[in-house]
Amino acid sequence: MKRLLVTGGAGFIGANFCHYWATTHASDRLVVLDALTYAGHLASIATLEAGGALRFVHGDIGDGALVTTLLEEERIDTIVNFAAESHVDRSIEDPASFLKTNVLGCQALLEAARVAWQKPDAPSSRRFHHVSTDEVYGSLSPAEAGFTERTPYAPNSPYAASKAAADHLVRAYSSTYGLPSTISNCSNNYGPYQFPEKLLPLCILNMLEGRVLPIYGDGLQIRDWLHVSDHCRAIDLILQDSAPGETWNVGGSTQDPNIAVVGMLCDLVDAAFTAQPGLAMRFPGSAAARGKASRSLMQHVRDRPGHDRRYAVDSGKIRQRLKFVAATDLAAGLAQTVRWYLDNESWWRSVASGEYRQWYARQYAAARK
């Protein structure tokens, strides 16, 4: 039986991980620590908390005293750190908050684990797993091979730089203090519970409400898309079978331009409206309800500063050594994602706050200039 502290467990990937773990490892103890900033929502794990599958604690990973208390009173033997500010556009607008959470917060969490796990009565088996991103590696040209675990770091945004710094801190605590840790660098995740500032949920919700689908530059930026359920399964394998000190790249083994992925979403939404005439009554402002193709909402806007052109992850190490293969292909995953947002309108309406709408309006207005 493991006793897990899941930081950032009310966010997108963290919440999906909690649902996965509660189903797959029902006898384990789950404790979620989340500051519930704009992108973290208790509604994403409310059913788990109500059913007793986890304990939720409202707090910040930078609060060392709180983390220490949780580690000791819950006898935590496994920390999975999802807590992070994670949106590139916001990091350009406010880099300081990314440094505070992603760097200083991660260091405080590492230090609390180091101190607690060095005590004589600490759990005998311990693991600190840090969830990172492929963006720490920078950008690839069209002909370059995918990032491997040996690719030098070359972050191009404040967000990517903050995650790179956190990765280095995890390695430093492993080398200097012997903290048993692992790191995973994942590609672009998508799926349920994703906050609508990210490309895919942003476009789905904009389609349903008849708003513009902003396409940065020419839209030919290439990403490796990973369904969040596959990511959760990969982390499980790492926790179960990886030795401490290892780093693992986790990708979906699919590379498609952003504009093509948005087009696929448009076609899926239009097909849903054709199959379910009642959707037109629920979403009267949508293009589909007005007899137009959702692709008509696509509009090219000024490109993001420092926008990485291409990401591609070489997942050969985790495939060969841990036998991980992404099970959800992009077409099926996008269809599932569109269906989830159609079926969970109350969730996304509750999280798409006025603050988010104001932020989106500012970003879109700036991109049009």
Image (tube, rainbow, N blue to C red):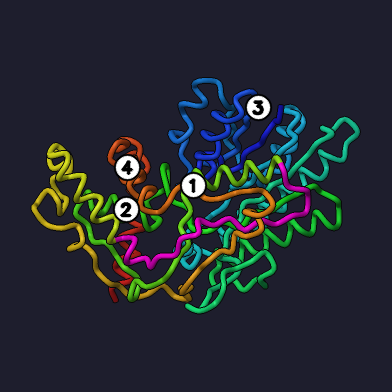
Residue range (magenta): 241-262
Work out whether 344 lies above or below 300. above
Report if residue 350 lies within the magenta region: no
Residue 120 at x, y percent in the picture: 91, 33
User: Which residue sits at x=58%, y=27%?
Assistant: 54
- How far apart are labels 2 and 3 at the CA level? 37 Å
Nearer the viewer's eye, disc 4 or disc 2?
4
Nearer the viewer's eye, disc 1 or disc 4?
1
Please tell me the numbered disc located at residue 327.
Answer: 1
Residue 303 visible in the picture: yes
Question: Label 4: few (<14), some or many (≥20) within 10 Å?
Answer: many
Residue 255 at x, y percent in the picture: 44, 64
User: Which residue sits at x=67%, y=64%?
Assistant: 149
Q: Which residue is mark 3?
A: 29
The quarter of the image holding the N terminus is: top right
Residue 258 at x, y percent in the picture: 37, 65
Asked if disc 2 and disc 3 are in contact, CB closer than 8 Å, the reply is: no
Nearer the viewer's eye, disc 1 or disc 2?
1
Which element type, helix, strand or loop, lies under badge 2?
Answer: helix
The quarter of the image holding the C terminus is: bottom left
Please tell me the numbered disc located at residue 170.
Answer: none
User: Which residue sits at x=19%, y=54%?
Assistant: 210
Image-based side of 221 in relation to 295, left or right: right
Residue 74 at x, y percent in the picture: 72, 28
What type is the residue that disc 4 sits on?
Answer: Tyr
User: Residue 117's quadrant in the figure?
Assistant: top right
What type is the residue that disc 2 sits on?
Answer: Arg
Disc with the residue nearer the chain's start (1 vs 4): 1
